[in-house]
Image: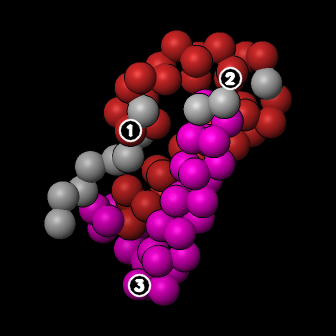
Amino acid sequence: MKNTPHELHDEFPEFADKMSELKTSDAHFSKLFEEYHDVNREVHRGETDVEPMSDDHMTELRRKRMVLKDELYALLSN
């Protein structure tokens, strides 16, 4: 398995400018953006065994990251 962090700027390069703008102008977007990055970092630490965790916890974190990513995409694509 490839253990690369799923950074939003890599996931949605076409929205790089809009992400930068919304991080400063939209408090809800900014909160989701930070929460995504916190969860993403935790997933990456678990995948690389920097911070070992159970499979159940890893699955829960990945689902949470997916939900946040979907919410952010919905805000970016409007």
Q: Which residue is mark 1?
A: 11
Q: Quadrant of residue 21?
A: top right
**CA distance separating discs 2 and 3:** 32 Å
Q: Nearer the viewer, residue 16 or 52?
A: 16
Q: Local crowd at mark 2 within 10 Å, few (<14), some, or many (≥20)?
A: some
The image quadrant where one finds the C terminus is top right
List x then y, in percent, for residue 53: 43, 78
Q: Is residue 66 above or below residue 76?
A: below
- Picture disc at residue 55: 3
The image quadrant where one finds the N terminus is bottom left
Would residue 12 appear left or right of 73 to someone viewing this image? left
Q: Closer to the N terminus: mark 3 or mark 1? A: 1
Q: Quadrant of residue 74?
A: top right
Q: Nearer the viewer, residue 75 or 20?
A: 75
**Which type of secondary structure does the marked residue at label 1 adopt?**
helix
Q: Closer to the N terminus: mark 2 or mark 1? A: 1
Would residue 72 appear left or right of 51 to someone viewing this image? right
Report the residue that reaches farthest toward the front.
78
